[in-house]
Image (tube, grey):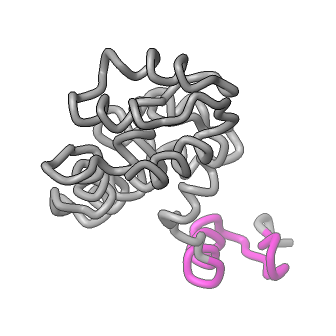
Amino acid sequence: MAQFRCEICGEEFEQKSRYERHMQTSHPRQAVSAADIEKTLKGVDFPCTRDELVDAVSDEAPQVREILENLPDREYRDAAEVARAFGELRTHEKAPSNQPSKTGGQRAMQTSSSEPSAARFASLFSGIDFPVDGDELKRYVRPNASEQEKRILEKFGGHTYHSMADVTRELERVS
């Protein structure tokens, strides 16, 4: 009588080594992909450190947990940054530093001689509790706004803003 039985196909083996070889060759475990990691991290509040990511993963995803434990110990801004670090870990090659999510985000936050971007304005209003009136809106951003941004804000109406979408529409109106 065989001691080892494949739970997938029912084949039986008398030796553990043959059973293990059968499992590796006939039913290999699927490798974890970046999409698997992102799916596992759904609902995680970013930014967070590697250790916070590991803590956020349930014991039901041991392969993903093991990968996260091997990532560089740093803060990750989003799941895409985690996926990029996973790619570096898997290929042993450092990703280029000019990745779109990094350079695009940095460029969007920079102010130039032309009009500041909507992303820059959104960052100025980060953490504000809506609804808010125009005067309150201006007071909230004044400490962090450039002179050019303050001049644009002075053009904002005094009405109530219910969301960041209202602020973006007003920015488009006054620009």
Between 45 and 103, the one lying in front of the other is 103
**Above or below 162: residue 83:** below
Q: Where is residue 89 in the image (x, y as percent from the top left)?
A: 29, 56
Quadrant of the rendered image containing residue 146: top left
Res. 174 visible in picture: yes
Tell me the residue at 43%/48% (across/down).
Answer: 174
Residue 95, quarter of picture: bottom left
Say if 44 sits above or below 16 in the image.
above
Q: In this view, does 50 lie above or below 144?
A: below
Left or right side of 71 for 6: right
Instruction: Where is residue 18? Give x, y as percent.
Output: 60, 74
Q: What's the residue at 84%, 79% (across, down)? A: 10
Q: What stretch is highlighted in magenta?
A: 5-27
Q: Residue drawn 33% across and 57% down?
A: 101
Is 4 covered by the magenta stretch? no
Answer whether residue 73 is visible to the viewer in this image. no
Residue at the image position 16 percent from the left and 62 percent from the top = 96
Asked whether, in this view, residue 41 is left or right of residue 139, the answer is: right
Residue 32, image x, y percentages:
52, 63
Q: Which of 62 and 19 is in front in this view?
A: 62
- The foreground one among 29 and 100 is 100
Q: Is residue 165 above or below residue 10?
A: above
Depth order, front residue of 110/11? 110
